[in-house]
């Protein structure tokens, strides 16, 4: 009986892990200058931006297939040109704090030809 319960639990864990696409560990040839940017304390209504730089140190071309933010208040901008080995590319991220209050952490999913990467922007938003 215990063997059946254990088998069921392990099967469920393995199935869950295989069916959910996870954020990949960054392959050895792909480097980001940072994966998290904290804007610190901002006044509500502020519009700020930052950049994340991706370096392709691999032997193959890297393509940014899509970039999606977890919230409409985060606006990503990126080059659709293939990133050749040895090149770098800048991903721009704007953050609009209008209507926000308290601590926020928003994610940016970067879908590439070499996997899914997640970037984060954070801020503590206070009323003016």
Image (tube, grey):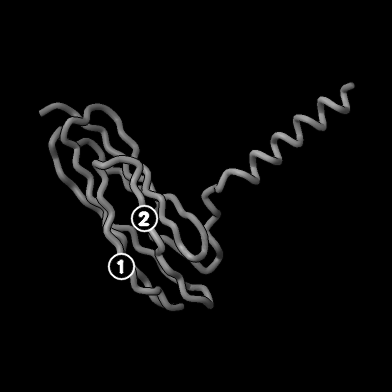
Q: Is residue 107 left or right of residue 50?
A: right
Picture residue at 65% right of the left edge, 46% below the top: 18
**Figure check: 69 above or below 87:** above
x then y, percent, for residue 112: 45, 62
x then y, percent, for residue 25: 55, 54
Q: Which image quadrant is residue 103 in?
A: top left
Local secondary structure at mark 1: loop
User: Disc 1, disc 2: CB below 8 Å?
Assistant: no
Q: Is residue 71 left or right of residue 97?
A: right
Q: Nearer the viewer, residue 22 or 124?
A: 22
x then y, percent, for residue 93: 27, 53
Picture residue at 39% right of the left edge, 76% below the top: 87
**Figure check: 80 above or below 16:** below
Q: Which image quadrant is residue 53 in?
A: bottom left
Q: Farthest residue in the top direction?
A: 1
Picture residue at 58% right of the left edge, 43% below the top: 20
| Whole-number angstrom distance, CA of label 1 to CA of label 2 | 10 Å
Q: Residues within 10 Å of mark 2 (few under 14, many from 20)?
A: some
Picture residue at 33% right of the left edge, 68% below the top: 80
Q: Is residue 42 left or right of residue 89?
A: left
Which residue in the structure is indicated by mark 1?
79
Residue 67 is marked as: 2
Q: Which image quadrant is residue 7 in?
A: top right
- Quarter holding the N terminus is top right
Q: Disc count in the image?
A: 2
């Amino acid at each position: 009986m215990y063997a059946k319960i254990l088998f069921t639990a392990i099967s469920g864990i393995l199935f869950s892990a295989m069916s959910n696409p996870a954020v990949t560990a960054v392959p050895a040839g792909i480097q980001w200058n940072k994966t998290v940017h904290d804007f610190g304390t901002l006044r509500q209504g502020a519009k700020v931006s930052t950049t994340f730089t991706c370096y392709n140190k691999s032997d193959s071309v890297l393509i940014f297939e899509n970039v999606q933010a977890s919230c409409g208040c985060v606006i990503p901008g990126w080059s659709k040109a293939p990133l050749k080995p040895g090149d770098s590319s800048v991903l721009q991220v704007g953050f609009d704090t209008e209507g926000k209050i308290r601590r926020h952490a928003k994610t940016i999913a970067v879908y590439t030809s070499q996997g899914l990467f997640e970037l984060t922007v954070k801020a503590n938003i206070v009323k003016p």
